[in-house]
Amino acid sequence: RSFIAERLQQVKPSATISIADKAKQLKADGKDIIDLSGGDPHFPTPQHIVQAAFEAINRGETHYSPSRGTPNLLRAIQKKFASENGLEYSLEEIIVTPGGKHAIYATLVATVNDGDEVLLLSPAWVSYEPSVYLAGGRPVYIPLEPEDYRITPEILRSVEAPRAKVLIFNTPNNPTGRVATKEEIEAVAEFAIERDLLVISDELYEKILFDGHEHISIATLPGMRERTVTINGVSKSYAMTGWRLGYLAAPRQIASQVLKVHQHSVTAAATFTQEAAACALEGPQDVVEYMVKEYEKNRALVVEALNAIPGIECKAPEGAFYAFPKVDGDSIKFADAMLEKAGVALTPGIAFGPTGEGHVRISFATDYNLLEKAFDRMKRAVVGR
Ligand code: PLP
């Protein structure tokens, strides 16, 4: 008898884990490993946000918060959606979760029936596929062309998925660094309406944009508000990954069902963390501008240094903090070789779905000098000196 649920058999240990394990082992053996495989900003959480958490704890805000979120944070999120995204939500349409990841998971659990298909645009963030399986759904990839990972109506319409119910859309994109254009977002919206799909719009990287690229929330497009769950959080924008604070906005009938999942699984996000997040959203935004400028400097280094390595081709990412260069051959072998020969941990592209192969993901949310050192070592490993 197996005590393990069948749906877990679909969830395979990912290529990212095996590389990360190897990197940990090498580090434990005393090797100097530069880890560019994660998605965690190297900046400390801004001081005024940290201070807000301490103050909340000292005020005694260490008990359960309302499941949906603290009134203070819910109002801050409501204002943020209205002023930054052009989205009007009532407080009953917003839920605060421990991380954007849980917001996605709770939405899938609340909306997917056993065997329903969930469409993922490949390359896609590593956690979508397992979350779909855990919710009892079946992930179906829509492979975007590695040439430019552009979304077109033709590519969307080519997918055969008669039981498709949900589509997960992510812009700015992890891992490709693409920021979807208005035309691409319109194509996704039209397709969602045509196939009567719910769209889970993952907008975690919305503030990390380069070269004048603009973020558009798909829920603002005609006919989309009623079929979109917008996901966001403070992890990436405010260097707050460890605080575990995300949120979602959805039409009332959907939000009330997601709230059930949330209420009976995690109860609520941590109370004082929510006060810190309210401070992040309502406080000075120059901290975000500063971090984005630093990412921009790192990006310039990453693109130049990678293109100087024979066999690697790297386009400038438009948003988020990942480069997704094309490499020679098998992505797992390439990442393995870089780990062993250069002591640099990267994420193999195959971890992101079928059209991620032939690429690796490199996080540049890290110290500039460390990045320089990493690329120097990679170049030497590739040219064999
Ligand atoms: N969505 C994307 C595309 C991500 O890259 C991440 C984190 O890596 C998340 C969602 C979840 O972030 P968190 O749960 O920290 O809010």
Image: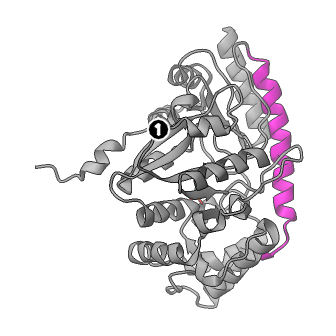
Residue positioned 63% across, 83% down in the render? 91
Region rendered in magenta: 282-309
User: Which residue does the numbered mark 1 point to in the structure image?
Assistant: 160
| Residue 192 spot, x, y in % from top left | 59, 53
| Residue 281 spot, x, y in % from top left | 75, 72
Q: Please, is residue 379 above or below residue 34 in the view?
A: above
- Kind of residue indicated by mark 1: Glu
| Residue 278 spot, x, y in % from top left | 71, 77
**How is the structure coloured here?**
one colour
Main SS of the magenta part reads helix
Q: Please, is residue 270 above or below residue 335 in the view?
A: below
Q: Nearer the viewer, residue 288 or 356?
A: 356
Name the side, left or right, on which 88 lies relative to 140: right
Res. 35 visible in picture = no
Res. 176 visible in picture = yes
Taking the magenta stretch, the answer to whether it contains residue 290 is: yes
